[in-house]
Every structure is written in C-alpha cells, then in structure tokens.
Image (spheres, rainbow, N blue to C red):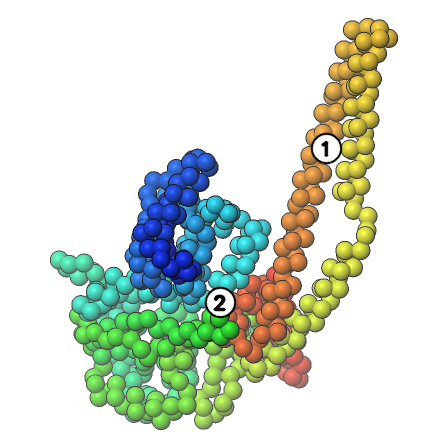
Amino acid sequence: MDRCLMYLRKSRLDTDYDEVSVEETLSRHRQILDRFCKDKNLNVVEVLEEVVSGESLAARPQMMRLLDMVSTGMYAGVVCMDIERLSRGSSMEAGYIMQIFQTNCCKIITPGKTYNLQNESDEQFTDMKFMFSRYELKTINKRLVRGRNQSASEGKFMGSIAPYGYRPYKLAGQKGNSLRIEPEEAKVVQMIFDMYGQQGMGYNAIAYALNDMHIPARKGAWGQTSIVNILTNEVYLGKIRWRREPVKKIVKDGFLAKTRILNDDYDLYDGLHEPIITEGQWDRVKAVQSKYSHISVHAERDLKNPFAGLLFCEKCGAIMKRYLPHPKESPTAWYRCPTRGCDCKIIKCEVVENSIHKAMGDWLENYILEIESDRQPKADPVATALEAVRGQLTQLQLQQENICEYLEKGVYTIDMFSKRNASLAKEIKQLQSTEADLLRQQGEGRQREQTTVQIIPTTQHILENYPTLTVKEKNRLWKLIMKKATVYRSRDDKLTVHIYPNLPK
Ligand SMILES: [Zn+2]
C-alpha cells in the first residue's frame, strides 16, 4: 500500500464529553485509527497530532504541515476520524483544503468512508465541489503564505509579475527580488498620474488617449482597469503593499453566507526600490478620487463581471468586455465587443444578465420535461439485448448439464461428449464476452444519466438565489452550469442571446 499520513485533531464536538482531556481524546482516536489501519493494511508513515484546537488554518500548525506534505504529491491518503476533522470550524478553508487533496490525488480515509476527490461521480464530492465554488480560495491562499510577510516587511518585491514601469531583479547576496525602473514605462506612469490628478481626465479617457498615442500596454490595449490599477498602486511611491487577512465573514442561519475582501485593509512597507512618482502627484490623484467617492476605487479590483470568461460576441466570437463609463457620462455598466470593425452594439450589463437568467430558466424547464419524458418506460436496446444474451446463456448451460447426463447414461460416447462440450463452451464464452460488453455500455449510460441530472439542482440554486449571490459566486456557479453564452445587438437594436448549458457529451 502507498504511503499514508494520519491526522488527529480534537474537534469542538468532542468538548461535549467535557471531562475528557485533549490528550485523552487524541489517544482514544489514535487507538481507533491504529486498529483501522491495521485491518485495512494501510501504510501510515507519519502521525500528525493537533493539540491546539484552533479555528483558523493559521492556528492549526499541524494542518499547515499536513497540507505542505500532501502538496508534495507523495502521499496516497490521509487517515482521520471523519472528514469534518479536516475542515470543521473553518468552513471558509474547507474548500481550499479539499482542493489540495484533489490536485495531489490524495484520498481522505475515514473509518466510515474513503473519499476519492478524483472521482467525479462520488456524490459526496459533488456536494463538496458545490461548496468550493462559494469560497474565496485566493484569500485563504494569501493567509497560508504567512512566511512571505517577513520578506515584504523587508521591502522586497513579492509578486511574480512586476508592476508596469518596473522590472524585477534578483537581489545580490540575499534571498528575494526587488524592482528596477524601466525608464520608458516610468514616463508613461508619470503621465497617467498627471492626466488624472492635474488634467482632470477620467480612467477611460486616459486609456483612450494612451491607445491613440500608440503606447504599448502590457497586454493588449489600455483599458480602464489597467489605469485604475496604476493610479491606486503605492508601489510607484516606493512602497511594498502587503495584504493581511482581508476576509469578512457573514454568518447567516449558521452558514457562511458571504465573504468580502476589504481591499483597503493592508500593510505598506518601505520598498527597496526607487519611486517613480512624488508624494505630491500621489496626493493630487487621491484628492480627485475622493471627489468621486461614490465609485469605490478598490471595488474595481473585485470581480464585477458575473460572466467573466463566459460571454462572447455572437458575431465575431471575441470575449465581451465589461466597462463602466466615467460617472459623468453614464452610471450603468455595459458590455462591448472589443473587435475593431465588429458591428455588435454595446449592451447594458443588466439587460444581458436578465436575458441569460431568463434563458437559463426557460431551458431548465424544458430540460426537466425532457428528462421526465425520457424516464417513461421506453425500449432500452441495451437492456433488451442483455436479456436475450442471458436467456441464451441459461439455455447453453442447461444443454451442458444435459450432455453430462447423456454421458453418464451412456447416450453419448466420450468422443461425442468432448466435441459437443467444446462447441458449447465456445458459444458460452462468446456470449459471456457480449454480456460483459453490454454491462459496460449500461454502466456508461447510467453514469452519463447521473451527470446529466446533476446540472438541475445547481441551476435551480443559482436561479432561485440569484439576487443574494455575490458577483464571484455568480461567476463560479455560471461556470458550473454553462459552457458559454453569446450575445449580439444588431444595428437595429435586435438583441440575441444564446446559452450553452454545460452538458456531458
Ligand atoms: Zn464582435
């Protein structure tokens, strides 16, 4: 058997037994699991015992170690009392933990059940997958890499891609990276700060101006987001920005209902790199931004587009861009086809969202009807064939018994028996292989049916709870139930929307 780990942790539930101490609980669990592993022949190479019963991942050092070990991909399974032992009390982090197990093909082995997160048809996994979609994995990831805090406080650059205007370089004689100024880009950064802070240009106007001047952007063309990102990044002041625990939990009916990232809650350290702009330039930009305080600058960094990665122009196939005009021009968000020359007109985001929501609802209704009519007793060719094959098999087996009897009674000679038996055996073997084929086909059919039906509750959930979902949740759920959607608004304002539900082939 492959290498396994054992994880022991006293959970809050155990405190209901009061008197029992943490050590006693752990040693009791240890005994149970030791016996279980012996029975199942599991090769446990290391036991991790969590004595602190912490709520968050950071307060569970053994769990952090466990995740590090699982991430090496060297362990086939983790043995624990129950699956809650891994995730309980930190439902926020459960999704993240499960993700690590899944990507490293590590099973969760409990005396009650073994969870193979690779196995899509495992219904437990389906529940968990649904759960994952609701968690802010990235946020948790940041908390996990707490060790990097130290480097940030030393003013080192922690990212993988340097901000526009800089290039990363390896620090000589010590660990870590810093940034050096890229002169051409630095001029553009200063220009952006002046356009906004002094010339009163909006984010979009600046983006258009830069594109007009043919100043190359990092990726594609300049857009509102890239301008906002530059105008809000303290890196240009020579600082290193480091976020800390930007999570807010709202518990509703005992469930974690919403999570929100508070982006303005982060640490700033003096960087090892040179600033590009002056404090004066920064302050002028801040002053203008606070005038438009009704648009949250930080909120720009949160996901705003519920169809991110899903919505395409029906005419040219380009991915539709969401954009927000300067508040002076229009208060609503729009989708726009970015292709030059494509005649798809801009469409209000709200209109697209309502149309897709409605289209999905209509589709679901028809789909449920379709499945129900499918369920009507109907000739199943595989089942019919299987029945026939099994009938023939029984016949042949009877004949085989008969010839044995004939041989005993002296009706058949040994030679006759051998010939007859050989031909019967050959026929039986052929039929058995046909039977196996048919059974496999039937199994595949059932599996397909299962994944097909699965889309229904997910779709119902998103449609019913739509107004209460965050944009991130909307996006994750749409991605679960939809391959893509296409929209097109013609010159004469005819809007077409097509949805592509995520059905198995
Ligand atoms: Zn287009």
Instruction: Please determine whether, in this image, residue 151 is positioned above or below residue 320.
Output: above
Mark 1 element type: helix
Q: Looking at the image, which is closer to me, 231 or 213?
A: 231
C-alpha span from label 2 to label 1: 46 Å
Q: Position of residue 119 (x, y in %)?
A: 53, 49
Q: Which residue is mark 1?
A: 434
The tally of labels here is: 2
Q: Amino acid at mark 1?
A: Thr
Q: Would you name the residue on which mark 2 appears? A: 134
* Nearest to viewer (mark 2 / mark 1): 2
Q: Is residue 181 left or right of residue 296?
A: left
Q: Residue at x 67, y 72 (%)?
A: 361
On-image quarter of the C terminus: bottom right
* Residue 56 appears left or right of 119: left
> Which kind of residue does numbered mark 2 sit on?
Arg
Q: Residue at x 54, y 59 (%)?
A: 127
> Would residue 144 be seen by someone viewing this image from the given angle?
no
Which quadrant of the rendered structure holds the N terminus?
top left
* Label 2 element class: loop
Going by the image, does 456 lie left or right of 321?
A: right
Please state which of residues 38 and 163 is positioned toward the viewer in this rendering. Answer: 38
